[in-house]
Amino acid sequence: MKFVPPIKLAWLRFTSCSGCQLTLLNNEDSLAELAHVVELHNFPLLSSACGNAEALDVALVEGSLTSPGEVERLLAIRRKSRLLVAVGACALTGGVNAMVKGERHKAMVSIYGKAGAEWDTFPPQPIHHFVKVDGQIPGCPPEPHELLQAIAAILHGGWPSHQVMPVCMECRINENRCLLEEDCAPCLGPITQAGCDALCPGLGVPCEGCRGVVPEANRDELYRLFITAGLSEQEIRHRLERFGAAL
């Protein structure tokens, strides 16, 4: 068996809930094996230790950017990382953090009081607005197997392939009940990128669109179906913009 040296990996978290990190750590059956092939230099949810490696093989970046200080940290990690991977909806599109939009100053004051008005901050932005991104792992949070597959593929010099299709196709494969057609539920499955095995619709929960839009999505037809289902234009707009207006 050919020996594969460990990859030097860092995980950076910006404005987010740390759910993406937790998803990887919840792969308890794979962590021992993962420890043999990954040399961690930063992983805030796992350890307070912070590595000082001059060069990294891969940086996994979670969260949206909301301050000049975060941008400086992102630029620094980009300069020393061979590969930089955006992990989760916040890093890819701004995520639910971007829902506040133009009322950010008001929101900061309402949450943090007078101190919030003095913070140097801007509306949440995806990381590709500031640096080159070599790979993306979508979802809120990402699927556990996608994180493991990405690390395994990088370890062997590649990147995992994926099927380009909407969540609706996974529902058909799994023989799920169509929540949009049969229940008139506001499901975003027709225009959302697959890869989650239609987990939410399979449990009777309409798709929220957290994985981002599928190429060539037919938004006009989905809009018509939502109107037919009885949703107002405002409800439809809010539904489509839930994850950083990615849809």
Image: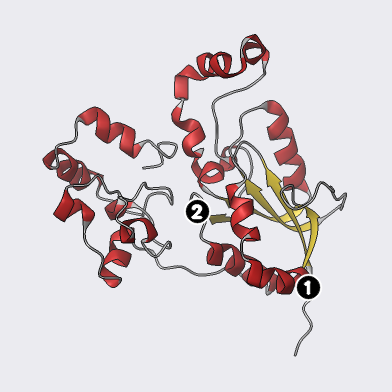
User: What secondary structure is marked by label 2?
Assistant: loop
From what the image shows, is residue 135 above or below residue 71?
below
At which x and y percent is residue 158? 62, 70
Name the residue at 26% across, 35% down.
Answer: 236
Cβ atoms under marks 1 and 2 closer than 8 Å: no
From what the image shows, is residue 137 above or below residue 184?
below
Q: Is residue 243 left or right of residue 120?
A: left
At which x and y percent is residue 170? 32, 66
- Of residue 128 and residue 63, the one placed in the foreground of this image is 63
Q: Is residue 108 left or right of residue 69?
A: left
Residue with the most extreme top position: 114
- Of residue 213 and residue 198, the one placed in the foreground of this image is 198
Going by the numbered disc 2, the residue's amino acid type is Pro
User: What secondary structure is marked by label 1?
Assistant: helix
Name the residue at 71% across, 49% down.
Answer: 45
Q: Quadrant of the N terminus?
A: bottom right
Q: Earlier in the sequence, mark 1 or mark 2?
A: 1
Q: Quadrant of the C terminus?
A: top left
At which x and y percent is residue 18? 62, 45
Name the residue at 29% across, 72% down.
Answer: 173
Label 1: how many Cα within 10 Å (few below 14, some 14–19, many 20+): few
Q: Label 2: which residue?
A: 138
Q: Is residue 114 left or right of residue 143?
A: right
Label 2: how many Cα within 10 Å (few below 14, some 14–19, many 20+): many
Q: Quadrant location of residue 72?
A: top right
Q: Label 1: which residue?
A: 36
Residue with the most extreme bottom position: 1
Going by the numbered disc 1, the residue's amino acid type is His
At which x and y percent is residue 75? 72, 40
- Which numbered circle lies on residue 215? none
